[in-house]
Amino acid sequence: MMPKAKPQLGFYPPMEATAATSLPSGSDWNYEIKYDGYRIQAHKLREQITLFSRRGHDFTNRFPTIVEGLRDLAADGLILDGEAVALDDTGRHVFHLLQRTGQNKAPVHYFAFDVLATDGRDITGERLNARRERLEKILMAPPDYIHLSPILAASPNVLLEAVAKHGFEGVMAKHADSVYQPGERPGTWLKHKVQPSDDFLVGGYIPGSTGLDELLVGRLVKGELLMVGSVRAGFVPRSRRLVLDALRPYRQRRTPFVNLPRTRRGRAEKFQSAQWVKPAVVVEIAFNNLTHEGRLRHSRFLRLREQHDISVTP
């Protein structure tokens, strides 16, 4: 009699964390580092390894070190949730290193923080602590470039201070009894960033000697794009090129913003040289807070998100 084939599980939209301005305390909460990388869902079925991005795109060819590491795991019919992270020479997480190509490309590591299936069986309905026990056994002797995301044993305030000191992005708090709810944001996972950030649509940019001097970003409100600020800080040469490459197909003559700042003489002078774009490219921007007009204060570019078209009324 032929052995029964193990089922192949499909992509799970990732469970999302709720942004929080403070973290809960108590033994029923687990704390982890919030990594500065790509959220990656890793599938292993026999010798077949597939890496999916947050939106379900195939990222397998982007991270060969992760693929080779996962291939050495004994587990099968496996789905892991984690983060692909590039490390600099000091071991610090640096997002823009993930986007390098060529001989100077930094090695990419995978930090697994959850397991959604083992031996071809869905276990998302189990409690987080039970899934964590399974994950620890799977990664008891992890291969190169594959890591178990550590549980941090300290109070939230101490953790946040340590995270800020060492340059990490923030802290995650997850309820020990939480089940994994694909594509949902149930509030049982919380994220506290050292500096808050959010995703914004790019509506234009100010050209400069480097190709891009400032990004003009906004938010959709009732189908209209409202400008929330311009962003100059946070770019490196590689990220400037990536953003420009992403924006070029969407260039247009008219501004998509409905609230472009004006002076008594008309449009503010800095926008005379702006290159406008269809608002289809999403970027993550860090900022200290918002002004009472809803503008970003002390903003900083973090990363280019996966693109998806969003219709607006220009």
Image (cartoon, helix red, strand yellow):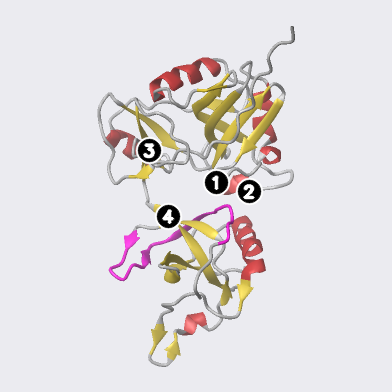
Marks 1 & 4, CB-CB < 8 Å contact:
no
Distance Cα–Cα, label 2 vs label 4: 20 Å
In the picture, the disc for residue 171 is 3
Q: CA distance from mark 1 to mark 2?
A: 8 Å
Query: Counting residues from the N terminus, which is met first, the one under dot 1 or under dot 4?
Result: 1
Q: Residue at x 47, y 75 (%)?
A: 257
Mark found first going from the N terminus, 2 or 3: 2
Instruction: Calculate the distance from the C-alpha at mark 4 to the C-alpha at mark 3.
Output: 16 Å
Quick one: label 3, few (<14), some, or many (20+) residues within 10 Å? many
The residue indicated by pointer 2 is 99
Kind of residue sitting beneath label 3: Val
Q: Quadrant of residue 218?
A: bottom left
Q: Residue furthest top?
A: 1
Secondary structure beneath dot 2 equals: helix
Residue type, label 4: Asp
Element on which disc 3 rests: strand
151 is higher (above) or lower (below) than 164: above
